[in-house]
Image (tube, helix red, strand yellow):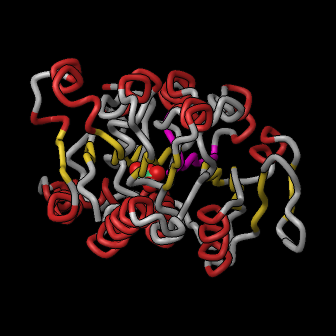
Amino acid sequence: METAGVLMTYPMSTYLEQELDSRFDLFRLWDFPSRTKFLQQHSHSIRAVVANTTCGADAELIDSLPNLEIVSTYSVGLDKIDLVKCMERGIQVTNTPEVLTDDVADCAIGLVLATMRRICECDRFVRNGAWKKGEFGLSTKFSGKAVGIVGLGRIGSAIAKRAEAFGCPISYFSRSKKPDINYKYYSSIVDLAANCRILIVACALTEETRHIVNREVIDALGLEGILINIGRGPIVDEAELVSALLEGRLAGAGLDVFENEPEVPEQLCNLENVVLLPHVGSDTVETCQAMADLVIGNVEAHFLKKPLLTPVF
Ligand code: DGY
């Protein structure tokens, strides 16, 4: 295979970095004092970009790489890739679907249980010695509660399957009703929120879904409602969520994603009824290896002129 310049935008996985380094002429963006410095020296050498959700491939980067042929993202989410720009330039795009579905769905259920059964609060209670002074209070039962899912794609469906095993009635909101699915469909996210106890956000971030979970949705979910977000932070209006939690208009929230990661509003950090994770839904050893293998396989297939493993286009 001819030597090709591959740019990694962020140190996402040591295994991926080593494998790419052994196969291609690898450039690490973080090795350079600035993106400008890197571009001044190497912009013409780069034929592939390996990006992730922390550092994607925006229009400015794509425009600066005249010989770019493929963008391979180490994520299923495509919100950090300028897809329009790639399409216009005829640049191929790949992502890492399927391999992370189970882990992200497990994480969603983990967040539901941690929030409703107050697992992190219990852990703090034991660690700080409070148990010796008295009993911990009560938590809320999850089994059998109505679960509403925003986005019934691969991950949403995997969450639904898991919640069904807890005896939960499932309903969902998405752009259109899915054929051959027996869960109750709502064409309005407000109606979905009004008819479930736990609302789980599992859709992709697009211009259509940005802040789709707004004050009206949060208020429809109501005083006993639990909001879980394993999709993307900006799908939820975070300021409205914080206000609702502070004012007691929502029972709790379990969040793996935030509007301005890694920034998390201090008010959220001070609340007991929220569980906060650092965007780790897919971060298991097994899944990260599988995601890295897909990225490597896609970039390799491109340069060998073979079919891509997981093309977006
Ligand atoms: C994804 O793959 O999109 C996950 O959110 C991890 O970034």
Would residue 48 be visible to someone looking at this image?
A: yes
**Is 186 placed above or below 34 here?**
below
Spot occupied by residue 125 in the image (x, y as percentages of width and height): 23, 56
Q: Is residue 306 left or right of residue 299?
A: right
- Seen at 31% across and 76% down, the residue is 286
Spot occupied by residue 253 in the image (x, y as percentages of width and height): 49, 45
Spot occupied by residue 293 in the image (x, y as percentages of width and height): 34, 70
**Nearer to the camera, 255 or 144:** 255
Q: Magenta residues, as a range?
A: 224-233
Q: Is residue 78 magenta?
A: no
Would residue 117 be visible to someone looking at this image?
A: no
Q: Quadrant of the N terminus?
A: bottom left
**Nearer to the camera, 313 or 285:** 313
**Is 227 placed above or below 261 here?**
below
**Is 122 placed above or below 186 here?**
below
Residue 156: quadrant of the picture:
bottom right
**Nearer to the camera, 39 or 293:** 39
Q: Is residue 210 left or right of residue 114?
A: right
- Seen at 15% across and 64% down, the residue is 22
- Seen at 32% across and 62% down, the residue is 283
Q: Is residue 31 left or right of residue 239?
A: left
Number of callouts in the render?
Answer: 0
**Is 20 placed above or below 266 here?**
below
